[in-house]
Image (spheres, grey):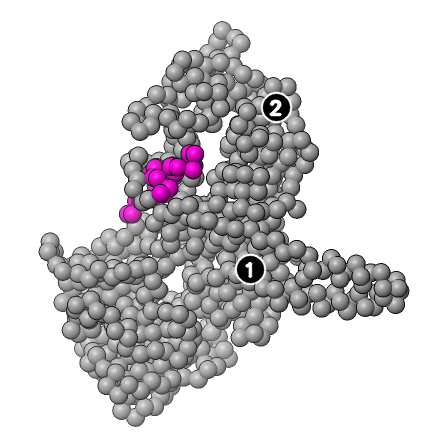
Amino acid sequence: MKQVSLLTSFNNTIIHFGEFVLNTQNGELRKDNALVKIEPQLLEFLLLLIKQKLLGEDAIVTRALMIDSIWSGKSASDDAVRAVVKKLREVLNDDARRPRYIKTIPTKGYLLICEIEQRAQGRSAWKQRSIKYGVVALLAVALFAGIQLTYLWYTSEDHAPKRISSLKVITEASKTFVSADLHNENKILYSKIAENEKSLQLYVKSIHNDDGTRLTWDQNYDHQARWSGDGKYILLRKSNSSGTESSVYSYPEMKKVFDEKNIASVNNSTEQTQNQLKAIAWLHDEDQILIYEIDQEAPNQVALYAYSINGKKLKLKTSIALKVSQIKEIEVSKDSQFLAIYYQDTKGHFSLTIYNRFTNEIIDTLRLQNKIDRLVWDDDSQLVSFLTEEEGLRSYDITARKYFNWKGLKPGIQSLISQCGSACFMFTRHDGDFLDISERPSPFVAQDILPTRLIASPGLDDLPIFGSDGSLFFVTRKDGRSLIEKRDLNNQQHQVFELPSSGTVGSLALNKANNAFIGELNQRIFLYRLDTGIFSFVTGIKEKAMEPSWLADDSGFSFYIKDKQITGDTNQFANNDVSTDFPVYYHYDLSTSSKRELGRQFHSIVNFENNSFLVSKVPGEYFLLTANAIEELFQDERYLKANQSKEVIRIPDSSPNAFKIIGKKLYYLDSLENDTVLSTLDISTLKKQSYPLDTNPQNPNFTLSSDLSKLVVTRTKSNASQIVKVEGLWLE
């Protein structure tokens, strides 16, 4: 059986997501306290999804990541990858068309879209382990005259001194800190992606308040930087698909005082070298920066130079025998004696070499199993530390010539910044995501002046719906409860009703008369009548019901139930990544409060006015059908062929909150060149138009006012990112 390698990276924590609880100490997955069977490969994929989600905004699990983690880097076919995704969806009772957990990102990979809460193991969990060990110890009494029992009692988890580290928030920012660098615990230099932009830009701010300065505006590069020792200069590294280039700027003037492209190479021959010199780090000798050069004709040698910013002189320091193809980072010890060199060797492996500049000696080289973010030296120049995703915080002791692991690290830690004491480190930390909801003028009506509501988030407000009077309804979560709330025209918030369960609300729809809601709660269809205040489920607990949609005349609504016994014709599906359970459609009549089966021919049905329907047999592909009633859609194929449009209409998501019908037009979310757009389709002409919505928002939902003047969008956004000081860590 394959060992699930990612379990160790979660430090024996309990992870809550959706309806499930995962114990990373033993790999047990539970739902409603019942054990859920999960294969090792599926558990590995689930852990990979969770790990990427915890990293922050870029939470996509690519095919390459899956192969590297699940198949240990060996080759795997597309069918094998899709099979793992499909099986995990079955374990989680998830649906590819209406995902609650795993969303497919076309051409990119897979995204975990549910909320995650990571908790440390409680004391009770350790007590359960102590009981197990106690039984074993009692058996040992008979063989060893009680000696082992006494030993176990004194060394058990409950009697050992409990060590607890402390965490203090130093400062925070509205978006995730990237490549943060702290100077004298006073000012922070960091990168982040600004609103509506795609590249990392450079910022500086005080740790004492939110005042700060944006330093870069080049949209073609990502920017990362490091302070000089005196805080008077910034070493800026710009990178894009073509490579990386470095410059030095004075601070705060941001005047360029060094450009690596303008430096002449220094070598022992009279000929000009064609090798490229790259600025990589600050030396702690006044104003000098460290520059390296890899000889392309003899890649076993790395030349190191020191360049003086004020003297504008380049001086060869040393040459190191390393089989290097690319240097990722070099960090100089505080006394400038040691170099920690993180690089990729000629065979593609990542390694860390500790080098003594004064004796020209390679002290140690470590083959790394995982990539690292940054190297940090302590003030005594005896300990170099780094953070890995799998093994946590590690340090190399120069004197002991040995690597150690640190314990006591808090959840949510993202990257290492500096060491602030013998057992104290500075990190960036990210607390997850929230849902941002905003009202704005719609792109369909040109207007320069329009009063819109400012909705104070962060929160968990989603699935927005405009009422006929301009009020805004949405689903929110408060203190573990799921509520339907309303914002009136004065932006005052009111509770409409509380749902009977705090589970997942998959969709919500309001009828035209504004007196009834239908929705999906934990894959059950519910009906709430605003006029009577009566809430009821219209499907059972074991029925996997989805996509309730009002009929055009408000007389009732349709929905479907996935029938596990009917798989349908498999050649109807576009790929193996879509569940083969075929939906059975039902109609619910409000006047009789009863439901009846319609048929099992379609994947999705959207009802327009004037007896027009969009129907789908293949996910994402629709035909326009005319019929006097919804029942007529389920007649024989000859009727369908005679009444359907010839054009194929492609809509990516048919869930009720992913499209709106106003008049003869369909409004829905789509993607164009990796950006999210709001598209409109005229049913009478089948003409499509698209309008930019935002720069790649995660998990967006939207609603439009009936007069098309206002647009409300919800999207997943990052919570505040923090700079934290963690003290009281201990070495293993």
State which tag comes first along the sequence, 2 or 1: 1
In this rendered view, identify the residue nearer to me: 120 or 634.
Answer: 120
Residue drawn at x 44%, y 77% is 544
Q: Which image quarter holds the N terminus?
A: bottom right
Rendering quarter of residue 479: bottom left
Q: Nearer the viewer, mark 2 or mark 1?
A: 1
Q: What residue did someone put label 1 on?
A: 120
Q: Is residue 303 visible?
A: yes
Q: What residue did someone put label 2 on?
A: 356
In this rendered view, identify the residue nearer to me: 686 or 378.
Answer: 378
In this rendered view, identify the residue nearer to me: 252 or 706.
Answer: 252
Residue type at mark 1: give it. Answer: Ala
Q: Is residue 101 located in the magenta-colored stretch of the structure?
A: no
Callout 1 secondary element: strand
Asked if residue 349 lies left or right of residue 97, the reply is right
Q: Position of residue 112 (x, y in %)?
A: 45, 59
Asked if residue 706 lies left or right of residue 163, the reply is left
Callout 2 secondary element: strand
Range covered by the magenta-colored residues: 182-208
